[in-house]
Image (cartoon, rainbow, N blue to C red):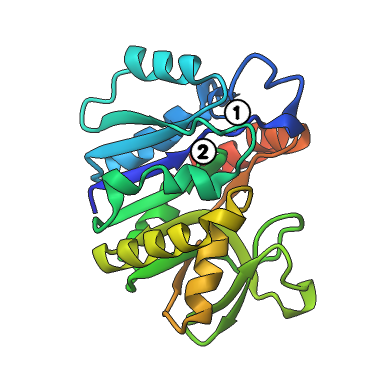
Amino acid sequence: MEHAVILAAGTSSRLYPLTHHLPKCLLPVGGFPLLEHQLIVLQESGFRSATVVVGYHRDKIERFLRTRMFPRIRTHTILNREFDRTNNFYSLFVCRERLEGRPFLVTHADLLFHPGILERTLRARGHICLTIDKEIVEETMKVRLRGRRVEAVSKAVPPQEAHGTFLGMATFSAEGSELLFRALEKLLPVARRSYFTAALEALIQQAEEVSYATTGGLPWIEIDYPEELKKAEEEVFPQILRSL
């Protein structure tokens, strides 16, 4: 797999005032912006290009990409012009022209993760594969599993029915990419403010197979609140360093 998409258009209001003048993906952890952590891991994992979907403070993200050197991965940006009134459903949809029919990985820009999690994800099989943690993390996307298939992926999955947490990282084969963008297009009139998992749920309802890979217990964190940023700095990033 050569291409990755990083969803980084949102306003990140839950991190105000830290994100009043800076997009969340440029917040530093361990001395480097989150986006830099991701691009380094992608580069080292063999990805040759990465598309960053921008919106909020797009100028600062684009300036960062111009001034930081990632010698083995090309970076591009795509603008979600409706970033302040849509969600990552629409951010992924605006990539359609570039990605439909091509294999790719998508990841949320607010993830800090051990490189081994990406390695496990890329080794997994399936036209659509979600990366999950077997632990339940509150206020995140939860998954319900049946055998090797994902049966549901939503914040609405009751905790007592959940088998894990969706990290916000997924891979799509060429066929899986076509299925995804058709589902996004069909739902677009009613789901612009939704998460892209709405399209995955629709595909599951159509009996399309959605598989999963696990983190294997390796450290990661999704950063939505100031306390999670602090945890990333003080706990998760040191754990990642110690295990490399």
The x, y position of residue 107, in whole percent, is 46, 47
**Does residue 84 show up?**
yes
Instruction: Rate crowding at label 1 as few (under 14), some (14 to 19) or many (20 or more) other CA atoms within 10 Å.
Output: many
**Does residue 243 show up?**
no
User: Which quarter of the rendered picture does the C terminus lie within?
Assistant: top left
At a point 54% along the width and 41% down the height, the residue shown is: 112
The x, y position of residue 127, in whole percent, is 33, 71
User: Which quarter of the rendered picture does the N terminus lie within?
Assistant: bottom left
Q: Which of marks 1 and 2 is nearer the N terminus?
A: 1
Is 88 situated left or right of 99 in this image? right
Instruction: Say which amino acid is labelled 2.
Output: Ala
Give the alpha-carbon distance from disc 1 to disc 2, as whole Å.
8 Å
Is 153 situated left or right of 53 in this image? right
Is 152 situated left or right of 96 in this image? right
Q: Tag 2, which secondary structure?
A: loop
Residues marked 1 and 2 touching at CB (< 8 Å): yes
Please count the marks in the image.
Answer: 2
At a point 29% along the width and 49% down the height, the residue shown is: 99
**Outermost residue toward the bottom in this view:** 147
Label 1 belongs to which residue? 24
Q: As rendered, which of 184 and 72 lies closer to the eye? A: 184
Instruction: Rate crowding at label 2 as few (under 14), some (14 to 19) or many (20 or more) other CA atoms within 10 Å.
Output: many
Label 2 belongs to which residue? 109
Q: Is residue 67 above or below residue 16?
A: above
Q: Tag 1, which secondary structure?
A: helix
The x, y position of residue 132, in whole percent, is 54, 64
Q: Is residue 21 above or below residue 229?
A: above
At a point 45% along the width and 47% down the height, the residue shown is: 92
Instruction: Say which amino acid is labelled 1.
Output: Lys
Which numbered tag is attached to residue 42? none
Q: Is residue 193 above or below residue 201?
A: above
The x, y position of residue 148, in whole percent, is 47, 83
